[in-house]
Image (cartoon, rainbow, N blue to C red):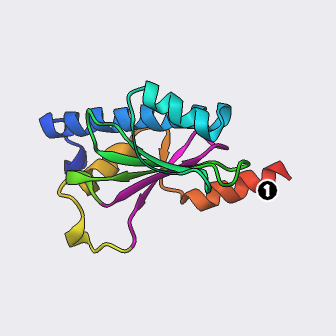
Amino acid sequence: MDNALVPNDDYRDLLRRATTVGKQLAYFGVVARKCSFDEAISSAERAGFTLVASNAERREAVLEWPLEPDFLFSLSFEDPAMISIVAESRGDIYGLNLVTHSGTDEFCVELKPSLGLERFGGNALQFREVLLSLPQFVETPAWVSASSSFLESR
């Protein structure tokens, strides 16, 4: 077994956090498919998320989960056919972007390309491995998934 995934207290904590963000992304996926921009913000606030920033003209919002602020969630309803959801990691897992859109149930795990490894959070790479061990998380870049969903809809 890879040392990064040896079950210990650190691994169990990262797995719990990975499961939590998976549920949060799934929630936003459902909201993106069923709600308007304004309804999505209201729903997220009722669910316990805090609105950090919003641009009504572009129909974009940034939210966080204050109980465990591992991620900032960005929603963009600018293209109603492909509503995007990006979760940007923070703190000890800084350096990851989790990307999905309204046309899929998978979440792409991307490393921030502009960062050198020395700038990643201390647990970022291990957290990435934990995420990729879960069935809904994939390495395939989100733009590939978006392109295939777009082509399939034609």
Tell me residue 145's x, y (percent).
63, 54
**Residue 20 seen:** yes
Which of the pair 127/84 is nearer the observer? 84
Relative to residue 149, is residue 64 depicted above or below?
Answer: above
- Asked if the magenta segment contains residue 147, the reply would be no
Q: Secondary structure at mark 1?
A: helix
Q: How many marks?
A: 1
The residue positioned 66% from the left and 55% from the top of the image is 146
Where's the N terminus, which quadrant? top left
Amino acid type at circle 1 is Leu
Relative to residue 47, is residue 62 depicted above or below?
Answer: below
| Furthest residue in direction top, as rendered | 46
- Asked if the magenta segment contains residue 112, the reply would be yes
The residue positioned 68% from the left and 50% from the top of the image is 82
Q: Which residues are magenta?
A: 95-113
The residue that label 1 is drawn on is: 151
**Residue 135 seen:** no
The residue positioned 55% from the left and 48% from the top of the image is 100
Tell me residue 136's x, y (percent).
50, 39
Residue 151 occupies quadrant: bottom right
- Residue 137 placement, left or right of 114: right
The residue positioned 28% from the left and 32% from the top of the image is 16
Tell me residue 65's x, y (percent).
34, 37
Residue 120 occupies quadrant: bottom left
